[in-house]
Image (tube, rainbow, N blue to C red):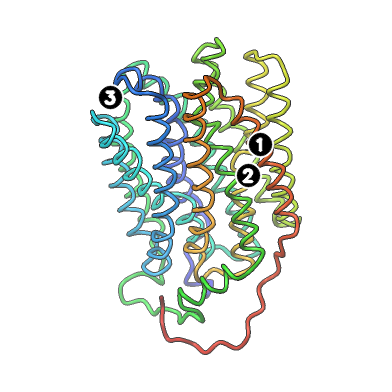
Amino acid sequence: MAASQRLSATQVLLCGALIVTLSMGIRHGFGLWLQPITQAQGWTRETFAFAMAVQNLAWGGFGIFAGMAADRFGALRVLVGGAALYALGLLGMALAESVLVFALTTGVLIGAAQAGTTYAIIYGVIGRQIPAERRSWAMGLAAAAGSFGQFLMVPLEGWLIGTFGWQQALLILAAAALLIAPLAWGLREPDFRPGAARAVREQTIGQALREAFGYRSFQLLMAGYFVCGFQVVFIGVHMPSYLKDQGLAPQVASTALALIGLFNVLGTYAAGALGQRLAKRKILAAIYLLRSIAITLFLAAPLTPVSVYVFAAAMGLLWLSTVPPTNAIVAQIFGVAHLSMLGGFVFFSHQIGSFMGVWLGGWLYDHTGSYDIVWWISIALGVFAAVVNWPIQEAPIRRGPTPLTGQTA
C-alpha cells in the first residue's frame, strides 16, 4: 500500500485507542457484577462464571469471522456491527431473568461484540496503515489504551453500581458502547471505500490458513496464548470474590483491578516498544515466567491490602503485554494481507484458555470452596508458556512462487 493511500498514524492510533478503551474498559469490570447478580438472582458463582466463559469462547470463535470480514471489507462495518451487539448484550445482561437468557446475552452477544470491537480488528488496521518499522510500537500503544480504559472504567463501573444499582449501571454502559460506531468512521480505510481499487492478494483465505497451521511457530504461539487467556480472565473475574472471601473490603478489589489497568499501560507500551529492538519470542517467554513468579509470591505472602496492590501492579505490567508481541510476530511471519483473520485464530486459542480459566474457577470453587487449585494451575501453565514461546522463529516465512489468484478474499 502506497504511503499516500494510508490514513494518518495519528488518526489510526487515536480512533483505535478510544475504541479499545471503551470496549476493553467495559469488559474488564465484569467481575464487579459477579456477586450483585448472583445474589439478586439466587444463582451460583458457577452460573455467572459459565456465562463469562461462553462470552470468552464466543469472542474467540466470532473473532475469526470478524477478522475475515475486516480483511475483506474493512474495519468500519465490523466495528459498527460490534457496537450494536455490545449495546444489545449489555441490555440483555441487565434484564435477563433466566440462566439461558443470561448466557445468550452476556455470553454470546457480548462475546460477538467484543470480537468486532477489540484487538484483532484494530490491529488489522494498524498492520495495514502503519509502516512495519513502527508497527510493534503502534500495537503496544493501542494495547496500552485498552489498559488505560481498564484504569478509567473499572472504578467508574464500581461507582455506577454503588450509585445507581447493578441493572442501571449496565444500561448506562450499553449507551456508552454505542460511541464505538462514530469513532469507527476514523478507521475507514481508503482501500475499502466504494469504488477504490483493491490490491490483488497473493493468497486466498484457504492458502493462508494452510500455511499458518502447518507452520510450527504459529502452533507454538497459539499454545502460549491459551495460557494468557486462562490466567488473565481467571484473575479478572474471580479475584474480587477471592479477596472478599478472605475478608478484604470490596474497595480493595476495585482498586486492585484499577491498578492492573494502570500498570498495564506501562507494560503493554513497553512490550510494544521493546518488540522493535528485541526478539519478541524472548519478551513473551519472560512475561509468562514472571507471571508464574508473581502468582507464587502472592500466594506465599500474608494477604493484606498492600500485598494485593503490589501483586496487582506486578500483574498489570504483565497483563496484556503479551498482545503486541504476539500480533507483531504474526504480521512479521505472514505479512498483513490476512492479519485480522490469523490474529483471530491465535486469539481463539487465547479465548479457549479464557473459557477454561473462568469456568474452572467457578466450578472448582463451588465443589471445593476454594480457588487454590486454579491458582496453582495458573502457575504451572505460565512455566509451560515460557518454554513453548522460546523456540518460535520470527523471520518472514519463505514462500515459493505463487501465481496470483486474482481474488481479494
Dividing the picture into quarters, in which one does residue 109 lie? top left
User: Pointer 1: what residue?
Assistant: 317
Q: CA distance from mark 3 to mark 1?
A: 32 Å
Residue 390: give x, y in percent of width and height: 75, 55
Looking at the rendered image, the quarter that the C terminus falls into is bottom left
Amino acid type, residue under disc 1 in the picture:
Leu
Residue 112: give x, y in percent of width and height: 36, 49
Q: Is disc 2 in contact with disc 3, using a CB cutoff of under 8 Å?
A: no
Residue 392: give x, y in percent of width and height: 71, 61
Amino acid type, residue under disc 3 in the picture:
Gln
Residue 120: give x, y in percent of width and height: 48, 55
Q: Which mark is residue 87?
A: none
Above or below residue 119? Residue 67 is below
Q: Is disc 3 in contact with disc 1, using a CB cutoff of under 8 Å?
A: no
User: Pointer 2: what residue?
Assistant: 321
Q: Residues within 10 Å of mark 3 (few under 14, many from 20)?
A: some
Q: Secondary structure at mark 2?
A: loop
Task: Please report the residue visible at 41 percent of the width from the left and 58 percent of the height from the top.
Answer: 187
Q: CA distance from mark 2 to mark 1?
A: 7 Å
Q: Secondary structure at mark 1?
A: helix
Q: Which mark is residue 168?
A: 3
Dividing the picture into quarters, in which one does residue 161 lie? top left
Q: Is disc 2 in contact with disc 1, using a CB cutoff of under 8 Å?
A: yes
Dividing the picture into quarters, in which one does residue 256 lie? top right
Amino acid type, residue under disc 2 in the picture:
Ser
Among numbered discs 3 and 1, the one appearing first in the sequence: 3
Q: Nearer the viewer, residue 129 or 173?
A: 173
Task: Please report the residue visible at 59 percent of the width from the left and 42 percent of the height from the top.
Answer: 320
Q: Secondary structure at mark 3?
A: helix
Q: Is residue 76 left or right of residue 352?
A: left
